[in-house]
Image (cartoon, grey):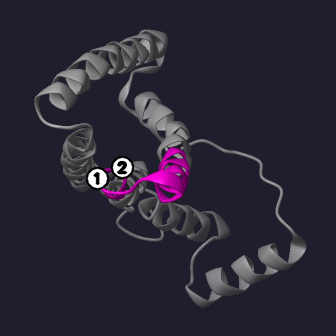
Amino acid sequence: MKTVQMTLDEGLVKEVDRVSKLLHTTRSAFTRKALREALARYNLEKLYAGMLIVTVPFLLLMGILSNYALFFTVMAFAFFHFSGQPVGNSLVAKYTDQRGRGLGFGLYFSAVFGIGSLASWFSGMIADAYSLNKIFFLLAAVIVLGFFVMLYLARSDDIKPGPGLDD
């Protein structure tokens, strides 16, 4: 274990002391348990999965709308799509070793921009062969696939709280 110093308001400390006494445990043990339980609810993979799935209706609408409705739908899609970047960056940090994190981010951004450059070529082929609106339906399907990948990662990487108060 490691000793850390934290600044807490007096009312919170009194409440922690009151509950710790009721549970016949120490302030430190109670705080460890509370922090573990709070961290168990914080899951980047689930957050990112939710941010992915929110964009699917916008992509589907982009395939059928036109004029101002299309414009506002694209704006909404862009808002939700780009708001996921900080979570994606946090996931890269989570899944890379601290010593190789720079390399991990370099590979991540190379892959993102590399796939992005190929996606425009691939989308052009789809637009020529079928129609422009089919691209949005295909992108929605790819995002749904990404959604399920993130749910799998969330399921396999849940943070488990410790066994008890006094560990």
Q: Give the range drawn in magenta.
A: 61-78
Q: The disc labelled 2 sits on which kind of residue?
A: Glu
- Quadrant containing the N terminus is top right
In the image, taking residue 34 as reference, residue 59 lies left or right, namely left
Quadrant of the image occupied by residue 10: bottom right
Q: Is the magenta stretch mostly helix, strand or loop?
A: helix
The extreme right residue here reads 10
Which residue is drawn at the image coordinates 55% and 86% (left, top)?
23
Q: Does the magenta stretch include residue 63?
A: yes
Q: Is mark 1 on a helix, strand or loop?
A: helix
Q: Which mark is residue 154?
A: 1
x, y percent for residue 119:
27, 22
Task: Reply above or below: 100 against 32.
Answer: above
Q: The disc labelled 1 sits on which kind of residue?
A: Ala
Q: Nearer the viewer, residue 152 or 100?
A: 152
Q: What element carries label 2?
A: helix
Which residue is drawn at the image coordinates 43% and 49% (left, top)?
44
x, y percent for residue 12:
79, 75
Residue of label 2 = 45
Task: Reply above or below: 162 against 75.
Answer: below
Asked whether the residues under the numbered discs 1 and 2 touch, taking CB atoms below 8 Å apart as contact, a structural biologist would say yes
x, y percent for residue 11:
85, 79
Graded by Cα atoms within 10 Å as few (under 14), some (14 to 19) or many (20 or more), the crowding at tag 1 reads some
Quadrant of the image occupied by residue 134: top left
Q: Does the magenta stretch include residue 123?
A: no
